[in-house]
Image: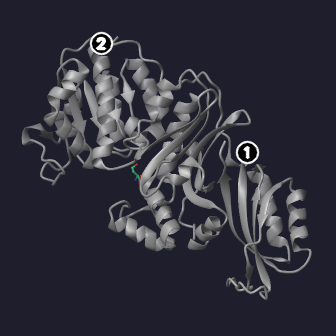
Amino acid sequence: MVQPQEQIRIGLLGAGSVGAQVARTLVEERELISARVGTPVRLVGVAVRDPEAPRDWRIPGELLTTDPEELIDNSDLVIELIGGLDPAGDLVERALRRGAAVVTGNKALLATRGAELHALARHSGAVLRFEASVGGAIPILRPIEESLSGDRITKVMGIVNGTTNYILDQMDTTGAAFDDALTEAQRLGYAEADPTADVEGHDAAAKAAILGTLAFHAPFTIDDVYCQGISDVTAEDIEAAAGSGYVIKLLAIAEKQNGGAVLRVHPTLLARTHPLASVRGAFNAVFVVAENAGELMFYGQGAGGLPTSSAIMGDVVAVARYLRAPAPEPPTISDEIDLPALAVENAKTQYYIDMQVTDQEGVIAQIARVLADHHVSIESMRQPGSVSLEGEVDDDAGGNGAQVQIVTHLASERDLQATVNALEGLDVVKSVDSVLRVEVEN
Ligand code: HSE
């Protein structure tokens, strides 16, 4: 049992863009935060690698230390904002073993060692909170964990990476190529110099694992998440999708299906009328479907020092209140529910197939036959215009090729892949240019 604390000592690990804002709030707003907690809180130290490094807010020299272990050992509440697995993982472990509460925004750590850290926290009676790990400022984890705890969540679907949403939005609104949109995102500071983690979907996959874990009360890791990034999305894909009334978004999806859960991150076609389609620029949003609540959407800034510090401080106040007056904490995850992670081959979703075909009689019949043979049903088919066989759009009906776009009904990944292979084998199909998953409104 945690003993009631009359003063909460807070140790901060890391003072990057989020950490500096958290330090500022804890120093400048100390009275307000203490009043909200109901007992004095005090920032006792900030562990950094280089005390001289320039920061967004100048941290008083007497708070800076290069010894995170000593700081942890003298704190009731540790805020971990170093990020990554190492050394952050060992430091969080040290804090939890001591029974200190931990607030972190570290999605990589949660998506990799979450179950182990939760077990450790349960064992030592420590609290572990991580609202800032998904969706920056957006309150999404606590609503899932607490507000919806009397309901059954069936699906969570989010735009949880601002960098890729910015890039796809630029491509959609300006017609820019992927590389140009990425360069612009880097110039504006949305994308890192090495954009791999964002662009290839790894950042979103970690967040999908965290969302799935909380939504379905079962422990998932990033290894359970199928992951496809946006680097292969072309300006032509975006234009073709737009012509059919869709926008392409990188979605992180956790969905209950076939007695298990499928977790996946991939570029997805969304009808422009879908609430997530309106999420522009670097903003994030998470769409939740629950049996009784129906559809919910949470929207806001998914990154940045100030917005993310808001989520960290929300957790700090909640945890500090608990330390002031400890009460039994509900489990954040439960191993009781046996919900296996299923391979993406088991997922059923709708698909969009865009192909170039020869423009002659019987072609559509052959294509329809292939889909029927593989148990894939067609929802809609469009032939937007004639094209030359080199792929040039030719609005004169004299072109000798045609573009065909098909949206299927729900189909399994396995059937769809077999369908695409068979379509590519048809003489009349010159190329299958894109195959994308489609999410419709539930
Ligand atoms: N790199 C992330 C993004 C923010 O682009 O949204 C931190 O999770």
| Residue nearer the viewer, 321 or 298 | 298
Q: Earlier in the sequence, mark 1 or mark 2?
A: 2
- Judged left or right of residue 375, residue 396 is left
**Position of 298 relative to 355 (above/below):** above
Quarter occupied by the C terminus: top right
Residue at position x 78%, y 59% in the image: 380
Residue 116 seen anywhere in this rendered image of the structure:
no
Calculate the distance from the C-alpha at mark 1 to the C-alpha at mark 2: 46 Å
Task: Determine which quarter of the picture holds residue 75.
Answer: top left
Callout 1: helix, strand or loop? helix
Few, some or many C-alpha atoms within 10 Å of disc 2 (few <14, some 14-19, many ≥20)? some
Give the numbered dot on residue 106. none
The residue that disc 2 covers is 325
Instruction: Select label 1 or label 2 by which is in front.
Output: 2
The residue that disc 1 covers is 346
Q: Residue 10 placed where, x, y %?
A: 21, 29
